[in-house]
Image: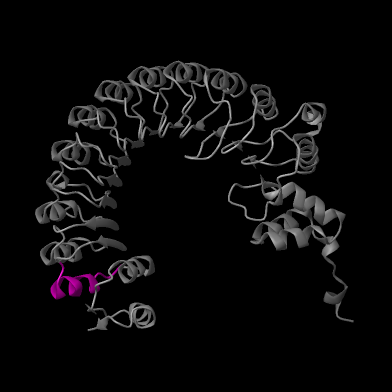
Amino acid sequence: MNPCKKKSYAGLPDDCLNLVYQRLTSSADHSSFGLVCHRWLHIQNKNHESLWDINNPTCSLRKSADITPEDFSKILCRLLIRFQHLKRLSLSRLPEVTDYVTSQSHLFGSKVQYLCLSFCREYSYKSLSLILSLFPNLASVNLTHSRGYSCRLPITVKGLEVLGKSCSSLQTVSLGNCQGITDYGLQVLAKSCASLKMVDLHNCQRITDEGLESLAKYCASLETVDLGECHWISDKSLEVLAKRCASLETVSLGHCQRITDKGLAVLAKCCASLEKVDLRSCQGITDLGIGLLVQNCHKISSLTIEDCSNVTGLGFLGSPKTLTHVYAENVPKLTTEGIKAMVSGGGIQSLHLSGPAVTDEAVIAISIGCPLLRLLWLDSCHEIQLEGWKAIGLCPQICEQGLRSLCNGCKKLSGLFVDDDFAKELFKRERSDVHLI
């Protein structure tokens, strides 16, 4: 008899089975793996790191309107006991927990590092404190609300006190759209969580310069801050943030109308490690501020100036090659020369443009100056003629996503010069009205 036929999977060590399980990609395969035997079920349990991901369409509990907090707490406890190595837990859109979990908590694993409580309809301060206390190693908490979604998660001063007390080692916190957050609440959180590296305050409209200055004072290790739609933030607090948090890498200031070139000057001077800056709808920004960023921040990779009404694009002249992504849709004063300046660094891989400044001359400059270009998004660019489209067709790195953007976005496109086989098949299949040259 062939000796190979005598071999059994039972002889494989756990390390090998772990590797097999980790190579499975679908949830169905994961479930089937655990049905083989108790040993394989144990391997599955040990490798299960995430529970109820917010984007998981198979979570039936989120679809059930009848499940009570008591029943949900029992289900949660059973799963936390079973999966001792969980790292990520999402309770988004699920019922609040009850005291029952406290009686079982000594049986839980304690490795959960990420907790999502976004979009929760009902949560008392007691329940919030209870669920946070279950996981002493939490490094990231998502409490984001959704616009127009009925949410009664208690993210006020008291809620932030609970968060700070329970999670003093917190590194990232998402508080987007939490309208109950005030300057004092942010100060309370910052004092308790000095290790914070990422804070999302998008659309927290009660935050002013005072709150941001408190955050900068106590959290000097910040790397990412989202202040989009925090309308009371001005140059004053941005300068404090830049001076105290020199390690900043990502700053989002979208719709902050009180931010001007003055604030950007300090940001560019103090935060040389900046990589991503979002300035969409910042009407106080001009080419001067853009120039300061690209000339002083030699690691900058992404810059967004959508809807900036006082930018022509000339500030991009002399950009470093690290600048790979520029979003410049609906910039009314954008000029053809400004677009040429955008691509002057030679590193652009993704470029979003719109409006009359996008002419044949601009597109030809893009095709010549952007050898790495993979995505070109053009909206309402009615000035482009045949020569411009020929130039786009010659961009060597334009990939599937970029070609699909061209195919789906340019409804009036009638002719295209292209020699790529995929592009030809795409346009023949989906845009038979376009004449391929």
Closer-to-camera residue (22/267): 267
Left or right: where 8 falls relative to 167: right
Q: Is residue 174 above or below residue 406?
A: above
> Magenta region: which residues?
384-397
Q: Which quadrant of the view contains residue 433?
A: bottom left
Left or right: where 423 falls relative to 27: left
Q: Which quadrant of the view contains residue 70?
A: top right
Closer-to-camera residue (431/167): 431
Give me the residue at 86% from left, 80% from top. Answer: 2
Is residue 20 visible in the rendered image? The answer is no
Q: Is residue 399 magenta?
A: no
Left or right: where 81 falls relative to 431: right
Give me the residue at 68% from left, 59% from top. Answer: 27
How far across and down, in percent of the image, does residue 122 sit?
64, 32
Give me the residue at 44% from left, 20% from top. Answer: 182
Q: Is residue 386 magenta?
A: yes
How far across and down, in percent of the image, does residue 53 sit?
62, 47
Is residue 383 visible in the rendered image? The answer is yes
How far across and down, in percent of the image, does residue 362 sit?
14, 61
Q: Quadrant of the N terminus?
A: bottom right
* Display colour scheme: one colour
Q: Quadrant of the C terminus?
A: bottom left
Q: Which quadrant of the view contains residue 310?
A: top left
Closer-to-camera residue (122/36): 122
